[in-house]
Image (cartoon, helix red, strand yellow):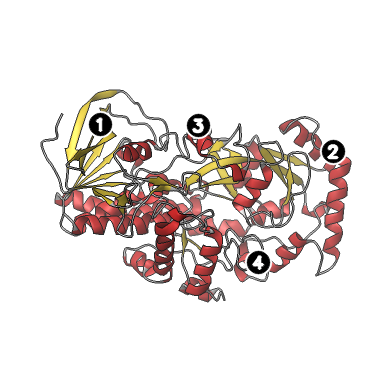
């Protein structure tokens, strides 16, 4: 039925981009209805589960760590990673340049003014393909939010709830949008089904039982509904030839409701989707031993020291080292004929180098618990990592290499790992540790990483031989492909207005967040630099919210 109350702006999706857009619209004095098919317990969407990393350029935190960064270097890295090469990249490139300006400019002060605080040690994620002009971060730029993902969501949720109390924002949870309402060539509202109330825990599947129909009208609609990572069939249909054949088996880094429905719905209304083949999936996924959603995967955030092998025991070539080139490594692994690979490491490495992505896997940072945080410097792996080591089906722990190989052949496909071949490979690698210099590119990378103070303090283990008994026990970790982010999406101009196939704005329709490739329909191009997804939600949500408010 028709809602008795029309509004100025309708925001579809109550994730981080939607919260940001709604807050900006309401700050301008406009009325907002924030619509989401999930319940209120899911407010904040996928950002809640994140580690809270933010891409910043030439920040005080970087300077305190001795890092020399600049807008020019960051833009060089972004464009070298994006590799824009299509006519459709006109707006994505403009969004990329605008976002680097934002990250090097007011982003930090804007967030700090809302109370967001950062962990003092800057991380070095996605170190790249080994070329100055190529993919990757030349310097550490991964700024971890104190409070992780919930800490990023909190200031925007607070702003929205203040406007709810003031009557400018109204929630419409358990409202599933099934179509956009068009009149005279303009988008004037949304329609769909109301769903029965659901009190399931955040991330778990909620009921899809319909209780009625609804229609909401406004002068503008902002779509902020996320990507396709929970819909593996759609991921496979969008999988590009350049990444090889789609995996038969993947784990899911997002809940099932991240299904891409609104992409198709918005496209059917006349908006243009570009770059659907650009995507960002990880190759270091673990099956969660204590899952929240079905097929729940957690990503290892690795330091550079683990020996990376394909499923048959062959070492991955340079530059496919842990933490360097995500999609390059994925592309290589898809040529092996297997959906998994292996890390081989030691207890000394896991204690220093293994972190798990996600707010729930980092209770010290998420809970802002300094005492628990200090426990990380004690002997032993961090608690969540140790729990995976003890309970996770992907882990093999052994006191000898023979036992390790037997475990790898038990956990993986039987008979693929040959002990003699693996022993020779490890012994050859270990001989490179006898000097402070080596021809092994990974060993050189490990030593180079430890020249950065942050890596030496908390991220990279001191170089050692894998077969050194004092560094043991030996550990092998089966790594699965983990679905995550959509890098293409709804094409938008620099105001966040959705464009049609002719390149003209579709009146009344805006988009922000992952559904528009975090800006323009794919501002990352082919590769992301990490810490750029949350920031992309914030920047595009802010942009679309302000633009929509100015036009109603």
Q: Earlier in the sequence, mark 1 or mark 2?
A: 1
Q: Which residue is disc 1 drawn over?
A: 192
Farthest residue in the front direction?
Answer: 502
Q: Which residue is disc 4 drawn over?
A: 456
Say the numbered circle drawn on residue 287: none
Q: Give yes or no for contact between labels 3 and 2 (Cβ–Cβ under 8 Å).
A: no
> In the visual, does 424 lie left or right of 59?
right
Q: Nearer the viewer, residue 37 or 358?
A: 37
Q: CA distance from mark 3 to mark 4?
A: 42 Å
Q: Dot 1: what SS?
A: strand
Q: Nearer the viewer, mark 3 or mark 2?
A: 3
Q: Nearer the viewer, mark 3 or mark 4?
A: 3
Q: CA distance from mark 4 to mark 2?
A: 34 Å
Q: Which residue is disc 3 drawn over?
A: 233
Q: Dot 4: what SS?
A: helix
Q: Position of residue 540 (x, y in %)?
A: 35, 56
Q: CA distance from mark 1 to mark 2?
A: 57 Å
């Amino acid at each position: 039925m028709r809602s008795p109350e029309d509004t100025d702006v309708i925001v579809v999706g109550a994730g981080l981009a939607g919260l940001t857009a709604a807050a900006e619209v309401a700050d301008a004095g406009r009325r907002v209805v924030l619509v989401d098919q999930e319940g209120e317990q899911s407010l904040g969407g996928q950002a809640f589960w994140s580690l809270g990393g933010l891409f910043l350029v030439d920040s005080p935190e970087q300077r305190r760590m001795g890092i020399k960064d600049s807008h020019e270097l960051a833009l060089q890295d972004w464009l070298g990673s994006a590799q824009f090469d299509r006519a459709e990249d006109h707006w994505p490139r403009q969004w990329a340049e605008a976002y680097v300006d934002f990250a090097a400019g007011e982003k930090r002060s804007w967030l700090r003014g809302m109370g967001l605080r950062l962990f003092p040690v800057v991380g070095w994620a996605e170190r790249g393909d080994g070329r100055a002009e190529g993919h990757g971060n030349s310097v550490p730029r991964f700024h971890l939010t104190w409070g992780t993902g919930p800490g990023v969501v909190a200031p925007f949720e607070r702003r929205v709830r203040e406007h709810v109390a003031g009557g400018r924002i109204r929630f419409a949870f358990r409202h599933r949008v099934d179509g956009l309402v068009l009149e005279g060539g303009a988008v004037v509202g949304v329609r769909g089904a109301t769903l029965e109330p659901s009190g399931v825990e955040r991330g778990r599947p909620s009921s899809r039982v319909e209780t009625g129909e609804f229609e909401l009208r406004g002068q503008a609609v902002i779509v902020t509904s996320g990507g396709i990572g929970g819909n593996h069939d759609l991921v496979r249909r969008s999988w590009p030839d350049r990444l090889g054949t789609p995996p038969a088996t993947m784990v899911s880094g997002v809940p099932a409701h991240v299904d891409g429905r609104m992409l198709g719905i918005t496209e059917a209304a006349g908006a243009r989707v570009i770059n659907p083949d650009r995507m960002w999936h990880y190759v270091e996924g673990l099956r969660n031993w204590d899952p929240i959603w079905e097929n729940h995967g957690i990503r290892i955030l690795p330091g550079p020291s683990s020996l990376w092998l394909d499923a048959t025991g062959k070492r991955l070539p340079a530059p496919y080292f842990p933490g360097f080139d995500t999609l390059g490594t994925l592309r290589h692994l898809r040529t092996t004929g297997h959906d998994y690979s292996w890390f081989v490491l030691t207890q000394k490495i896991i204690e220093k180098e293994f972190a798990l992505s996600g707010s729930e896997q980092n209770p010290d940072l998420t809970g802002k618990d300094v005492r628990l945080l200090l426990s990380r410097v004690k002997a032993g792996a961090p608690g969540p990592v140790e729990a995976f080591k003890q309970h996770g089906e992907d882990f093999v722990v052994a006191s000898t290499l023979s036992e390790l190989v037997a475990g790898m052949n038990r956990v993986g496909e039987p008979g693929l790992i040959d002990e003699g071949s693996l022993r020779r490979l490890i012994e050859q690698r270990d001989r490179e540790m006898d000097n402070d210099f080596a021809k092994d590119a990974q060993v050189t990378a490990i030593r180079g990483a430890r020249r950065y103070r942050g890596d030496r303090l908390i991220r990279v283990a001191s170089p050692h031989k894998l077969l050194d008994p004092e560094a043991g026990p030996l550990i092998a970790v089966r790594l699965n492909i983990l679905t995550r982010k959509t890098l293409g999406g709804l094409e938008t101009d620099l105001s966040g207005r959705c464009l049609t196939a002719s390149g003209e704005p579709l009146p009344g329709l805006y988009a922000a967040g992952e559904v528009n490739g975090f800006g323009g329909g794919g501002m990352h191009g082919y590769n992301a630099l990490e810490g750029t997804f949350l920031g992309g939600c914030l920047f595009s949500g802010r942009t679309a919210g302000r633009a929509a408010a100015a036009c109603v």
